[in-house]
Amino acid sequence: MIHPASQATRSTVSSDPYVFFMSYARTPMTGGRAKKDASDMALEQFHAQLCSDIMQLTDHDGEESPGFLDQRMGVGADWENRLKHALATCRVFVPIYNSRYFRREWCGKEWDAFARRQEEQLRTRPYTGNAIVPVLWVGPQHLTLPLPQVAGKVQYSHPDLGKEYLQSGLYGLKQAGRHLKYRSSVWALAQMIVKVAQQTSLEPCDVELFKDLRNVFDEGE
C-alpha cells in the first residue's frame, strides 16, 4: 500500500511495486543517426521529475524507480517478460498521448494488458475508479480524433491542470518556454497519480493473463 509520506510506515522487507507504468511511442531516428530525438530526451526528463515528485508524496522505498519507463532494454523474451511483469504489478497506467501513440502496435498491447488486469480484479472484488491517467504530450489538435474506442472512454482533459496544459500539452509548454507552468503541471500529475493509486488499490496479477495480447487501438474502427 502506498501511503502519503507524512503517514509513512516504510517496509524493510521487500521493494515496493511501481507506482506507475509510462506507456509511450518513441520518435523514430532520422538521417541514419543513432541519436535520441529531443522529444524523447524531454520525455525521459519528465519521467525523472515525475518520479522525484512521487517520492516526495509517498513512502515508496526507492529501491527501484517508482515509475517504469521502457528505454529499449533489448529485444526478445527477457525484454517482453520484464515489460509484462511491470504491467502486472504497477498501480497506475500512464499513456503519453502524441500523434504516434495510437499508431503503435505495442502501445495498444500495453493498454490491453492493463485493461485485462482491471477487468480481472472486478471479477473478484470492486475497486474505486479507473487506474489509467493519460498525459497530453501535445495539444489535442495534434492528435488523430476521434480517439480509439478504448481511449475514448478515459478522461484526458484533467481541468485541474489548467487551460494552457489542455491547449499545448506538456511538451508544448516546455518548447514554448513556459517552465513554471510545465513544472506545476508535472507536480499536479504526480498528485493525481498518487491519488488514483491509493483509491483504486489495484492488485497484482499473474502474467499468464497477458497471453495473446491484442492491439486494442485497432478494434472498433
Image (cartoon, helix red, strand yellow):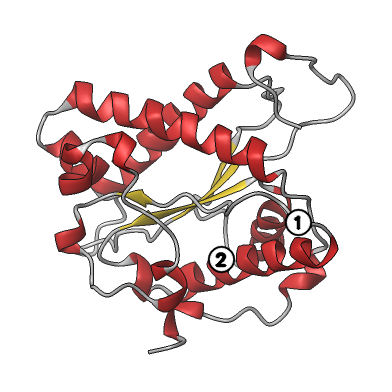
Q: What amino acid does circle 2 point to?
A: Glu
Residue at 39% from the left image edge and 39% from the top image edge: 44
Crowding at dot 2, Cα within 10 Å, few <14 / some 14-19 / many 20+, comes out as: many
Question: Which residue was labeled with disc 2?
Answer: 110
Query: Where 122 sits versus 93, above or below?
Result: below
- Residue 172: quarter of image: top left
Tag 2 near tag 1, CB within 8 Å: no
Compared to 109, does 196 lie above or below? Answer: above
Q: Residue at x 60, y 51 (%)?
A: 129
Mark seen at residue 167: none
Residue 102 horizontal/vertical position (percent): 36, 71
SS at circle 1: loop
Observer-nearest of 145 and 108: 145
x then y, percent, for residue 113: 64, 68
Residue 19 seen from this side: no
Q: Which quarter of the picture shows residue 25? A: bottom left
Query: Helix, strand or loop at disc 2?
Result: helix
**In this image, 164 relative to 219: left or right?**
left
Indicate the quadrant containing the N terminus: top left, top right, bottom left or bottom right. top right
* First in sequence: mark 2 vs mark 1: 2
- CA distance separating discs 2 and 1: 22 Å
Q: Is residue 202 left or right of residue 139?
A: right
Residue 43, given in percent of the width and then of the height, sits at: 35, 42
Q: Mark 1 sits on what residue?
A: 126
Is 78 situated above or below 183?
A: below
**Residue 203 in picture, x, y percent from top left:** 78, 50
Q: Residue furthest bottom?
A: 221
Res. 23 in view: yes
Amino acid type of the residue that numbered disc 1 sits on in the rendered structure: Pro
Q: How many marks?
A: 2
Q: Which residue is outermost to the left?
A: 176
The structure residue drawn at horizontal position 41% and vertical position 52%, both measured from the top left corner, is 134
